[in-house]
Amino acid sequence: MGKRKQKVSTQKSLWKRMASGWQIYLLLLLPMIYLIIFCYVPMGGLVLAFKKYDLSKGIWGSPWVGLENFRKFFQSYKFTVVLRNTLTLAVYSLLVSFPIPIVFALLLNAFPGRRYKKVVQTVTYIPHFISTVVMVGIIMQVLNNRVGIYGSLYTLFTGEIAPDILSKGKLFKHIFVWSGVWQSTGYNAIIYIAALSNVDQSLHEAACIDGATRFQRLRYIDWPSIRPTAVIMLILAAGGIMNVSFEKALLMQNDLNIAYSEVISTYVYKVGLQTGIGDFSLSTAIGMFNSVINFILLVIVNGISKRLTDNSIF
């Protein structure tokens, strides 16, 4: 009887707290509706991965084929190609684009001039707001072997026409990753700069009195202060490692680099929507495989982080 009364009183206090802060919950209403409509409701369509979709019968009326779509993907000659390309771009991008914003934030925080830091920060995060289509257009123009900056400089110094690096498949991953680093470094560093701004300045003052160098202060004060944030960002990045940018990869593809630029996301698009194929069931199965791999990696990295650093997202 006592537990029941305690439960009722807890529920009443919860409703009272919600009623007192109803404005906050009203603000959360639209995002919640958005998540339900566009994130949770579409999950029902995952059943397509286990069916042979028939437009006349609809999703629920289409015949059940079990794991046939997954087997078809695994036995396809494209499986090893798209998986290798996806992992190559994802791991390469993670190894490069994850530590660079951290180093950038630490170096920017070490600069003494406040106005100079603001200018550098603004200039570096502006490229993030360039759309993917425009970004790829800039890449194509700059790296054009005849009229681009790369081609013009090559011709100026050598007197010959520059090699067409956009058509060389082996160079695709380098162009893809490093252009992404240029576009995202400043924006990704914002969260680390915000964490560094909360560091107690008395720690730096005490370290200076003790004779610590700037590098020592960076190592023993600045880095430990942002390490928990970096760990959480690493876990989240590992959970989306297979989600290579679809738009950028598709726009940068051509007939000469397709063997290196075809990733899972572009293959899903072509299988599901490209004229002549239109296999919605197979594309759903491929997308589901990609999501399952991401989830497994998220759980593994989160578990390792929790054991080694006591920082985790769950």
Image (cartoon, rainbow, N blue to C red):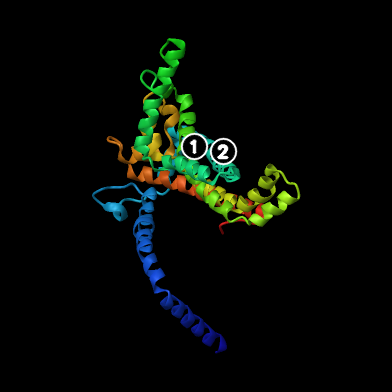
Secondary structure category for the residue under label 2: helix
Q: Position of residue 209 (x, y in %)?
A: 74, 51
Task: Give percent across and percent down for residue 89.
Answer: 49, 35
Q: Which residue is drawn at 55% across and 37% down?
A: 96
Quadrant of the image occupied by residue 6: bottom right
Residue at the far top in the pictured view: 159
**From the image, which quarter does the C terminus lie in?**
bottom right
> Disc 1 residue type?
Val
Callout 1: SS: helix
- Residue 296 % position (x, y): 54, 49
Residue 260 in the image, given as x and y percentages of width and height? 45, 29
Q: Is 278 in front, or is 209?
A: 209
Dot label at residue 150:
none
Find disc 1 in the rendering and name its residue.
181
Q: Which of 193 and 163 is in front in this view?
A: 193
User: What residue lies at 43% left-to-right and 18% top-to-bottom?
Assistant: 153
